Image (spheres, helix red, strand yellow):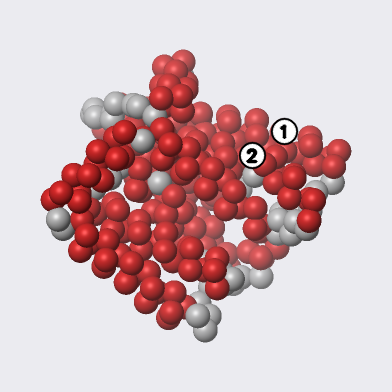
Amino acid sequence: MKEIFTHFYQFLKTGKINRYENSFNKKATEFGKLFLLFEILFVVAIIIAISVSIIVHPPKNETQKWVKNLTPVWAFLVPVVIAPLVEELTFRFWLKATKLTLCLSSLFVSYILTNNIINSYYYRIDETFTLEIAISFGVAALMYFALSFKKVLSSVHKFWEKNALILIWISILWFGFSHVKNFPFEGWQYLYAPIMVLPQLAMGSVLAFGRVKYGILFSILIHMIHNSIL
């Protein structure tokens, strides 16, 4: 565990990490260590958030309330399968810049941003869904066209390599603060937001580390298993 803690710290500090490639058995061991790191940081962050909430009494997280209104099948699929998959492809898949990752991520990123602009909801099909999908596929198509030029793709690779640390922290902070909407904050209550989403910031940091070092499958599986436990 000491080694993975060290690599994790260096990742957050420098943005650099060697991709892990080894046998299946060793990958399974590394997955277990990464999941343990994930849960340790999550529990610590939860304890801090709860401790602060006892003192300041911020609005309660309304996620569970929304999930309980779903049918049993959707109450399982949304938090355990759909949400982790969408969030990993939106917030972390693009941390490794290839034509595939950038095009697919641009589809999900544009969908999330369009939802926020229209004030819709990510996992619900409503009257604006067709528009959101059309915009998302349009952006992805433009991204595919742009990256078809070798000079453009080469420039993107250089930018990603030069600004890896900045992109990693954008991913972590974006994922964490995207969960602010789970709380019905009003006015000055937004000052509590960084503490209330501290668990998601902790999650995002480990998932970003897992995505870059071990691959997107690691971050997706850890995210799904964690959500299934809660």
Confirm whether residue 215 shows in the render: no
The residue positioned 14% from the left and 55% from the top of the image is 149
The residue positioned 49% from the left and 58% from the top of the image is 83
Instruction: Identify residue type, mark 1.
Output: Ile
Disc 1 designates what residue? 48
Residue 38 marker: none
Residue at the extreme top of the image, as rendered: 2
Residue 198 marker: 2
Give the quarter of the image for residue 138. Answer: bottom left
Q: Is residue 31 above or below residue 188?
A: above
In the picture, measured across the screen, residue 103 lies left or right of residue 189, that is left
Residue neighbourhood size for the residue with mark 1, other residues' Cα within 10 Å, grouped as few (<14), some (14–19), many (≥20) = some
Helix or strand or loop: what does disc 2 sit on?
Answer: helix
The answer to whether marks 1 and 2 mark residues whose Cβ atoms lie closer than 8 Å is yes
The residue positioned 37% from the left and 39% from the top of the image is 211
Instruction: Identify residue type, mark 2.
Output: Leu
Q: Nearer the viewer, residue 143 or 126?
A: 143
In the picture, measured across the screen, residue 178 lies left or right of residue 58, that is left
Q: Nearer the viewer, residue 199 or 64?
A: 199
In the picture, measured across the screen, residue 114 lies left or right of residue 67, that is left
In the picture, measured across the screen, residue 86 lies left or right of residue 101, that is right
Residue neighbourhood size for the residue with mark 2, other residues' Cα within 10 Å, grouped as few (<14), some (14–19), many (≥20) = many
Q: Nearer the viewer, residue 7 or 118?
A: 118
Residue at the extreme left of the image, as rendered: 150
Q: Is residue 76 above or below residue 168?
A: below
Q: Is residue 7 above or below residue 222?
A: above
Q: Mark 1 or mark 2, which has the lower sequence index?
A: 1
Give the quarter of the image for residue 45. Answer: top right
How many callouts does the rendering have?
A: 2
Q: Residue 27: horizontal and vertical position, in percent?
A: 31, 31
